[in-house]
Image (tube, rainbow, N blue to C red):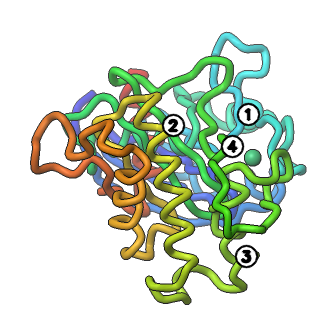
């Protein structure tokens, strides 16, 4: 694929959809944002914006919230799975898009796609074992192993692993499936429920920061010990509190107790746990990366 070829992308998130046109070199030419509602209204708006822009486009990438069936061999390929967003449960996303375009389609989770984009253009250039975590209204994570996004039984859903609960945390946890999984204890809504405010309205010496950093530090340790990434990226709205990242590094180091070297194997000076390089374009460029990888 030549670098000036144009690719369409859809990043389907829980609260908003980003649609855009990018080049194969990773430049975003045009983008728009649409609020996520029920599938029919949302897909109507996506089509209205994208369809007139598809002339000369080589493919359409879709980076969706999960769970979604991403194995082309599955009879449920392209369908949304057991999401708390009940209107979307079992919705056949790929089929709904296929109705109005014959372009080659590529599909993965928003976080797997973002990991691929960060490798190609962002904070993980030159790395091929990378984990991308997003901490926002939920906690999700994409894992790229030896250059390929991990799929299997489903795809990674790292937010639903269980942390060791902190003794001074008496909240029940908000996950409708598990209560006190990482998402239930440490996503944005859990912070709001526990402290009555989002993290960005509290100062870094408030106990909310230490608790959040400890949970995300535990999550980092679990990921480092399983997926063995050489870059572990933490993005999402909660990470806009810039004081949090060094606190997560400290918490991870404390939990690891010198078992791993957190400076990263490729370059002793380079940080292993970092924030995204592509910021708000990670999902959209991730969708474009899916098309490039499939070509
Ligand atoms: Zn859960």
Left or right of residue 180: residue 128: left
Q: Secondary structure at mark 1?
A: loop
**What is the distance, in whole Å, between disc 4 and disc 1 at their CAs?**
33 Å
Q: Nearer the viewer, mark 2 or mark 3?
A: 3
Estimate the spatial distance between the alpha carbons at disc 2 and disc 3, rounded to whole Å.
41 Å
**Residue annotated with mark 4:** 160
Residue on which disc 1 sits: 99
Q: Residue at x 33, y 66 (%)?
A: 246
Q: Is residue 29 visible?
A: no
Task: Give the secondary structure at mark 4.
Answer: helix
Q: Secondary structure at mark 3?
A: helix
Residue 27 image offset from top left, x and y in percent: 29, 53
Name the residue rendered at 69%, 82% in the picture. Answer: 195
Direction from residue 271 to residue 268 in the image, left or right: left
- Label ID, residue 194: 3
Give the vertical position of 75 relative to 226 (above or below). Answer: above
Dot 1 or dot 3: first in sequence order is: 1
Comes first in the chain, label 4 or label 3: 4
In the image, 4 versus 288, the foreground residue is 288
User: CA gap, disc 4 to disc 2?
Assistant: 30 Å
Residue 60 numbered mark, or none: 2
Q: Is residue 202 above or below residue 265?
A: below
Residue 114 lies, in percent from the top left, at 44, 45
Q: Nearer the viewer, residue 98 or 67?
A: 67
- The reply to whether residue 136 is visible in this rendering is yes
Up-down: is 290 above or below 6?
above
Q: Are marks 4 and 1 in contact (CB under 8 Å)?
A: no
Q: Nearer the viewer, mark 4 or mark 2?
A: 4
């Amino acid at each position: 694929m030549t670098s000036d070829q144009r690719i369409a992308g859809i990043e389907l998130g829980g609260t908003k959809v980003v649609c855009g046109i990018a080049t194969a070199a990773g430049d975003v030419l045009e983008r728009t944002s649409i609020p996520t509602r029920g599938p029919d209204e949302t897909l109507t708006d996506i089509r209205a914006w994208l369809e007139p822009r598809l002339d000369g486009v080589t493919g359409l990438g879709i980076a969706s919230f999960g769970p979604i069936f991403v194995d082309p061999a599955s009879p449920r390929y392209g369908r949304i799975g057991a999401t708390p967003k009940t209107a979307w449960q079992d919705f056949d996303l790929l089929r709904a898009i296929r109705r109005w375009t014959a372009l080659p389609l590529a599909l993965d989770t928003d976080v797997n796609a973002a990991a691929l984009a960060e490798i190609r253009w962002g904070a993980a250039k030159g790395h091929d074992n990378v984990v991308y975590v997003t901490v926002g209204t939920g906690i999700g994570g994409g894992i790229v192993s030896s250059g390929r996004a991990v799929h299997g039984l489903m795809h990674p859903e790292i937010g639903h692993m269980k942390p060791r609960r902190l003794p001074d945390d008496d909240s029940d946890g908000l996950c409708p499936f598990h209560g006190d999984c990482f998402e239930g204890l440490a996503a944005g809504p859990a912070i709001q429920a526990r402290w009555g405010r989002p993290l960005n309205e509290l100062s870094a010496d408030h106990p909310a920061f230490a608790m959040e950093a400890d949970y995300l530090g535990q999550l980092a340790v679990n990921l480092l010990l399983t997926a063995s990434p050489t870059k572990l990226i933490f993005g999402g709205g909660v990470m806009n509190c810039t004081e949090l990242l060094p606190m997560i590094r400290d918490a991870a180091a404390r939990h690891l107790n010198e078992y791993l070297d957190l400076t990263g194997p490729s370059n002793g000076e380079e940080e292993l746990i970092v924030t995204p390089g592509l910021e708000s374009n990670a999902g959209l460029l991730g969708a474009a990366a899916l098309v490039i990888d499939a070509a």
